[in-house]
Amino acid sequence: MAAVSGLIRVMERAARKAGGRLRRDFGEVEHLQVSRKGPADFVSKADRASERTLYDELLQARPDWGFVLEEGGIIEGDPTKPRWVIDPLDGTSNFLHGIPHFAISIAAQEPRLDGKGWGDVIAGVIYQPITDETYWAEKTRGAWLHDGRLRVSSRRHLDEALIATGIPFAGAGDPNEWVKIYAEIGPKVAGIRRFGSASLDLAWVAAGRYDGFWESNLQPWDTAAGCLLVREAGGFVSDWRGRSDPICDTQVLAGNDALHSRLHKLIVGALKG
């Protein structure tokens, strides 16, 4: 077992505090399903309250670090220090409908040495409040679920692989692109799953529960922690061209070495012409 660093302890403490509030709110939103007004406004408040809790906790612990927040936008800090990249409620639609599959995602990203933009993600925590699972990773120190080391799946063949994805909805994303990719991948794999939380999809790839994952048109806060988890668990994350940026969000393809390569070839073939 790896010794948990002070940075991970700070991140997990913040996630658990915000997660406790989300857990209570989730119990309430199930009752709101039958109300005339509906739960949407309540969920929006829950999202903002979670973000505020995370902001307050992390600001207190690292007062000179900046933030990239889903709701609050970019808050500048000391440009020579890392910044937080935060999704306070990943899986909002699941939460809204009383489906217990959502997470809090926190990543710490360091500035580039040349001072031009942002570099590697150095730590990530994904916390699932309902199952009380904490996935965490630090650069060069591996990926973990609580105190158990995570490894990506060792499956090598597509016909044995269970692949996760995100499907375009409500005008977001490119349905035509997704259909082309699905038409190539779907018939060749053991199954496709769409559970509605990209951060947990990536955490489950790191844990070997999924063998791969693809999605496009995400945001940095959706994937920052998850990209690090997959890489530290021995996997690969890239865009459709094979570029492996510190945070892949516009296009995300994740898996072990063999399956990432095979899935990448299928995507490239699907999108030709």
Image (cartoon, rainbow, N blue to C red):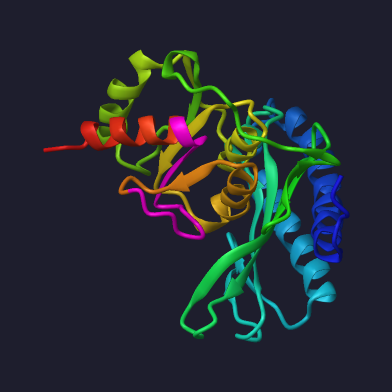
* Image: 47 above or below 234: below
- Quarter of image, res 87: bottom right
Compared across the picture, whether 147 is left or right of 52 comes to right
Camera sees residue 37? no
Q: Residue at the spot x=82%, y=54% of the render?
A: 12
Does the magenta-highlighted stretch encompass residue 224? no
Question: In this picture, which residue range is highlighted in magenta?
Answer: 242-258
Residue 185: x and y, percent? 35, 23
Residue 267: x and y, percent? 30, 34
Residue 190: x and y, percent? 47, 13
- Quarter of image, res 71: bottom right
Does the magenta-highlighted stretch encompass residue 257? yes
Camera sees residue 221? yes
Compared across the picture, whether 271 is left or right of 61 comes to left
Front residue of 73 and 243? 243
In the rendered picture of this protein, how many numbered marks are placed on residues?
0
* Image: 207 above or below 222: above
Q: Residue at the spot x=50%, y=31% of the render?
A: 212
Front residue of 89 and 211? 211
Front residue of 3 and 43? 3
* Image: 143 above or below 107: above
Residue 269: x and y, percent? 22, 32
Q: Residue at the spot x=36%, y=18% of the render?
A: 186
Q: Residue at the spot x=80%, y=33% of the render?
A: 130
Compared across the picture, whether 33 is left or right of 27 comes to left
- Quarter of image, res 272: top left
The quarter of the image holding the N terminus is top right
The quarter of the image holding the C terminus is top left
* Image: 195 above or below 168: above
